[in-house]
Structures are given as C-alpha cells and as structure tokens.
Image: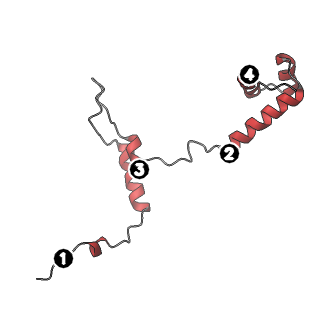
Amino acid sequence: MPKLNKTQKYAIQWLNHNGSDAEEISKELNLSLDQVSATIESNAAIKDSTPDKKTTRTRASNLMITHTSGKKINSVAIMTKEASEVGDESRKKSNSSTNQSKGIFRPKK
C-alpha cells in the first residue's frame, strides 16, 4: 500500500466533509478502501483532540482596538464594551480575598 501524499489526504478530507462515503472517495481518487478509511479515521481523531474556539479563554486585551483606522498605527489602546465586560467578569472570578496591605510598609506614627 503506497503512502498518500498531502494532496490526496486533503482530497479525502474534503470529499468526506462534503458527505461522500469511503467507497465513493476510493473510486474517485483510485485509492484502496483501506487507505481512505484510515485517513478518515485519523482525521476524526484529530478533530476530537483539538479544542473548539468557544472553549478557549477570551482576554480583554484581544478585544481592544489597538490601531488607528486611518494610518493603521499601533500606538493606541481603546477599550471596547466587550473588553470591559470580559475584564469585569474576570475580576469577579479572581481571588479577591488576598490582602495586599501586608506587603506595604507603613511606619507607625
């Protein structure tokens, strides 16, 4: 069984994504059914292990405007409404019970 090149793997993944079954793909690409089914299974395993974009953590810095509209200069930082909401939620969830006053030296009067 010869090794598949990238073009063949992409073609298998694309045809599978469009709803073709393994037999149709093997006939169309002139490949064995074992090669096609192994490629489809390995692609399905990779999809299961990658996290969705919705599960990744959104940071306020990613939602801020960081360049001007006219000259596209990256010397600005404007907080948007969404960035403010994300910052407020993260502040609520963070551990606010830490006492920071212990680290400040205050001489007695």
Q: Position of residue 36 (x, y in %)?
A: 83, 28
Which comes sooner in the sequence, label 3 or label 1? 3
- Viewed as shown, does residue 12 lie left or right of 31? left
Could you say whether the residue bearing mark 3 is in a helix, strand or loop?
A: helix
* Quarter the C terminus occupies: bottom left
2 and 1 marks in contact (CB < 8 Å): no
Pointer 2 residue? 49
The amino acid marked with disc number 3 is Val
Please identify the residue farthest to the left as the structure is shown. 109
Q: Which residue is drawn at 40% across and 61% down?
A: 92
The amino acid marked with disc number 4 is Ala
CA distance for labels 2 and 3: 27 Å
Could you say whether the residue bearing mark 1 is in a helix, strand or loop?
A: loop
- In front here: 60 or 88? 60
Which comes sooner in the sequence, label 2 or label 1? 2
Q: Which residue is drawn at 82% across and 18% down?
A: 29
Pointer 4 residue? 11
Pointer 3 residue? 86
Pointer 1 residue? 106
Which comes sooner in the sequence, label 1 or label 4? 4
- Viewed as shown, does residue 27 lie left or right of 14? right
Q: Which residue is drawn at 54% across and 47% down?
A: 56
Could you say whether the residue bearing mark 2 is in a helix, strand or loop?
A: helix
